[in-house]
Amino acid sequence: MTAFPHLLQPLRIGGCTLKNRIMSTGHDTTLPVDGTVNAALVAYQEARARGGVGLIVLQVSGVHETARYTNHVLMATDDAAIAGYRSVADTVHRFGTVLFGQLFHPGREIAEADGGLLTVAYAPSAVPNERFRVMPRPLKKAMIDAIVHGYGDAARRMQTAGLDGVEIVASHGYLPAQFLNPRVNLRDDAYGGDMDGRLRFLREIIADIRSKVNSGFVVGLRISGSEIDDAGLTEDESFDAVSRLDDGIDYVHITLGTSASLGGAIHIAPPMTMKPGYVVPYAARIKRQSRIPVFVTGRINQPQDAEAIIAGHHADVCGMTRALICDPEMPNKTARGAPEDIRACIACNQACIGHFHKGYPISCIQNPVSGRELRFGVLPTASRRKNVMIIGGGPAGMKAAVIAAQRGHHATLFEAQRRLGGQALLAQLLPGRAEFGGLITNLERELELAGVQVHKGTRVDAAMIAAAAPDAALIATGAKPYLPEFPREGALQIVDAWEVLRARVEVGQSVVIVDWRADWIGIGIAEHLAKLGRSVRLAVGSIVAGETLPFYVRDDAAATLHKLGVKVLPYMRLYGSDSDSVYLQHVSSGEAVVIGNVDTLVLCTGHAPVEELSEALEGSNIDVRVIGDAASPRTAEEAVYEGLVAAAEL
Ligand SMILES: Cc1cc2nc3c(=O)[nH]c(=O)nc-3n(C[C@H](O)[C@H](O)[C@H](O)COP(=O)(O)O)c2cc1C
Ligand code: SF4
């Protein structure tokens, strides 16, 4: 008897049957390079299908030339696209996974320039987009007709390719949502006015699709249950729209947020500060009213949560997208009753949506194979079993040990501290970042499953390595705080971020934080101290606080700092300090900025590698590889990736 009877129950929808209620929702992988499906995307989706997911919704496909919202968006505007779609469909069908396509037009949500040139954006009315600063042209009737036909033609192509259905993207403030929204649709023709008028565009799309596909071909609708923005669709408006449409569609898929504003966009891929399953009440309201299946997505990371949602009749299918990016085998592990083996997503956003926003192919900090299936999807068993010593039990060393052992090597991991995790142990102490500790829990389970020998509380030096004479030594000794030299006069309290996090120091009332990295640490320390009632100035060397962070994490943090009254000083570098002042310099103007009456200066000035061991091993005839922060302090993403690469090459 499974612990997941509802989640693993099949669902009949249109002409197809989902073998379980787990869905990978449409997510732009940035894997395609020329607007068509390529081998990397097929391999990516194959991994998820092999992992047992019931339904894959392919990433957005543009339905009209004006739908190119990024440089790499898939396009379904030409019959030449059919072959690519067919290769994904054939591949995932082999594993019994159902495949839908996403039909997409961004309207005014044009995020990127095409080859450096901004394209002309079209929308129902000339209402500017706040986030991308786009002033769209109002759509003329002829172009509305062309776009509507584009949806139908794209659906026809997808059906021809063997896909099982399509999902109209009316979520996140994209074109259909722009028509629905009375604050964005100011038209006085048949496409504007009351809800009936504003629904006309969607109704025409559905009719056009239906006229071009067979009756069993599924037509679903994705919509934000609320766009969570003052100018966005409200919960009542979304609810009203869905209620009026549900006789035309086969399912409705509820998510949250809008692309149109920095605040609303946070909910597109909600960071770990959002509660797991917080979207569910919006879906449940629609489910109570609706005669069609309701899908729900947003921070559903664990099968236990998904099971409760389906069992509670809050929804019929759960989108678990990042959960599947992080562990494509999650459905199989659920089905075989081994949920403790799942590598749970921690909603860090770093390599999935974080890569998307930088225009890089998708990956996952915990699962660097994601998006790189063609290179690392199958790691060959080692031709000779080697003795491998891995020194340093942070993310780099842990991952390296796992992969080395999985490949058949004799892998032994040494950690000087009593606990594994390295800097992740500290990172999880930052406010709202406790889930980051999941990185360690997941890697500890992987070590156990791979059968790695782990020695904690064991400091390894060059002599021990020489005595053990391993075939290879992977050095993952991490980093320590980097404290720059600067002129100091007087006895101002100067501490580093790690001391504050470990509660080793009593910080004064008036605090200046100097944040060179512009990452989680500076803003986290600022939040922590502001919550303790300190007066906090955060001097960042970047143009905004948290500049290097995934956008939704950054913007979520900006909201928190703003509410807490933290004063952010951008473009600052540390110049010096005296007994009660911190001297800064504006990095562009070179002008001095003096902050007086300071009790404590907190340095978030980055890290330096711990390289004693790697230096001591220089010139030895052992195969030595330095990985992660020990090579150069960066993030957990590089650490885990380099652990994989080093062990894959052994
Ligand atoms: C890398 C990435 C790209 C995304 N692109 C799309 C997209 O193309 N279409 C869409 O409707 N949603 C997109 N989303 C949102 C996801 O479909 C999903 O709603 C989001 O990841 C939250 O679900 P989760 O918490 O299960 O990951 C994207 C999400 C990620 C992480
Ligand atoms: S990068 Fe982070 S948020 Fe994205 S899938 Fe991996 S663990 Fe989840």
Image: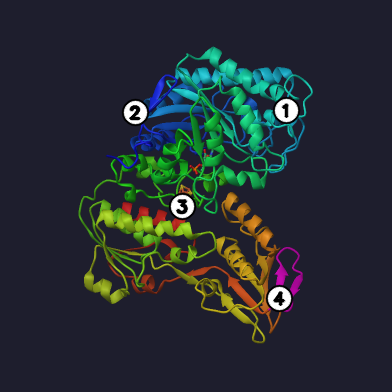
Who comes first in sequence, dot 1 or dot 2? 2
Q: Residue 115: x, y in percent?
A: 63, 37
Who comes first in sequence, dot 1 or dot 3? 1
Indicate left or right for 455 with 421 as reference. left
Identify the mark at residue 346; answer none if there is no mark: 3
Indicate left or right for 432 with 178 as reference. left
- Asked if 422 appears above or below 543 in the picture, the reply is below
Identify the mark at residue 96; answer none if there is no mark: 2
Q: Is mark 4 within 8 Å of ligand 2?
A: no
Report which residue position mark 1 lands on: 124
State the image quarter where residue 282 is shown: top right
Indicate left or right for 599 with 193 as reference. left
Who comes first in sequence, dot 3 or dot 4? 3
Report which residue position mark 4 lands on: 583
Part of the protein shown in magenta:
584-598
Q: What type is the residue that disc 4 sits on? A: Tyr
C-alpha gap between disc 1 and disc 4: 51 Å
Q: Is mark 3 within 8 Å of ligand 2?
A: yes
Q: What type is the residue that disc 1 sits on? A: Pro
State the image quarter where residue 606 is shown: bottom right
Q: Disc 1, disc 4: CB below 8 Å?
A: no
Q: Is residue 26 visible?
A: no
Name the residue at the right extreme.
188
Residue drawn at the location 73% of the way across and 18% of the way down? 141
Who comes first in sequence, dot 4 or dot 2? 2
Within-10-Å neighbours for mark 2: few <14, some 14–19, many 20+: some
C-alpha gap between disc 3 and disc 2: 28 Å
> Which quadrant of the figure contains the N terminus?
top left
Q: Is residue 172 visible?
A: yes
